[in-house]
Amino acid sequence: MTVRFRFARTLCLALVLGTAGFAPALIDPALAQDDPAPPSRQQKKLPEAPAKLPKIDRTKNLDFLFGALKAAPDDDSAKNVEARIWAIWLQTPSDTAALLMARAKAAVDAQKIDIAIKLLDSVIKLRPDYIEAWNRRATLYYMQNDYGRSLADIREVLIREPRHFGALAGLGMIMQEVGDEKRALEAYRKALAVNPHLEKIPDQVKALTEKVEGRDI
């Protein structure tokens, strides 16, 4: 039970309360440059911005960030990259979805889990393509010990984003709790393959490897 509650706190902070922690990462550091020097008298007038800006390619951004996450030289660098990945995942597809997600978070803060789940139900019905609604609901079902529904939602997350290391870690936690240590080890390894800097998961992989595959001779 101690392992479960320690991991549950980590997962809930990352998946349910993540909005507050990662919101600043929505700003691209590349855009936060020093103010340019004042223009000289002979400087020409700057061109005006185009009326229609090109759309940001979300998939390419994620591909780049996942590559950077694997190549991160240390934990601090990895956390910065991880925060930007979460920022993209947390971007809501509509104002209505954003409002419902905010209310769901407030319900969680007030420990009204059933209400939060109903709000997430509405988000998923409205925008079934929004991965984080599935992911947060999976976390809340886990907190209620409803592993069947939690696993069903994790499956929906991984169908849409197989690299979702939070969902993979959650899958490992559930498998470990129900006694399926082989599948737990597999899920944890997949999570680490995507994000080698996950906290506590390497220790679980080491312990489960000894149990499932035995010690090296």
Image (cartoon, grey):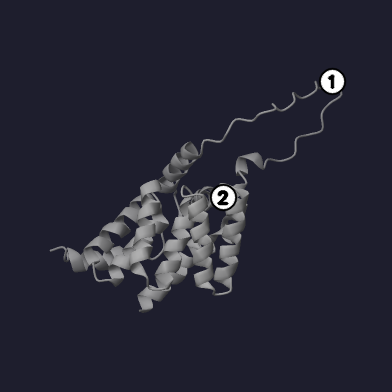
**1 or 2: tag closer to the N-terminus:** 1
Q: Is residue 70 left or right of residue 40?
A: left
Q: Are marks 1 and 2 in contact (CB under 8 Å)?
A: no
SS assignment at label 2: loop
Does 126 sit above or below residue 202?
above
Q: Is residue 127 left or right of residue 216?
A: right
Label 1 neighbour load within 10 Å: few <14, some 14-19, many 20+: few
In the picture, the disc for residue 92 is 2
- Pick the residue in front: 134 or 193: 134
Q: Residue 144 location in percent, x, y? A: 42, 73
Residue drawn at 51 percent across, 71 percent down: 113
**Residue sticking out furthest to the left:** 217
Q: Is residue 79 visible?
A: no
Residues under labels 1 and 2: Cα distance?
Answer: 45 Å
> Residue flagged by tag 1: what amino acid is it?
Gln
**Residue placed under numbered mark 1 in the picture:** 42
Residue drawn at 20 percent across, 69 percent down: 211
> Residue flagged by tag 2: what amino acid is it?
Thr
Label 2 neighbour load within 10 Å: few <14, some 14-19, many 20+: many
Residue drawn at 54 percent across, 64 percent down: 17
Q: Is residue 115 left or right of residue 152?
A: right
Q: Residue 166 location in percent, x, y? A: 42, 58
SS assignment at label 1: loop
Q: Is residue 90 visible?
A: yes
Give the quarter of the figure containing the N terminus: bottom left
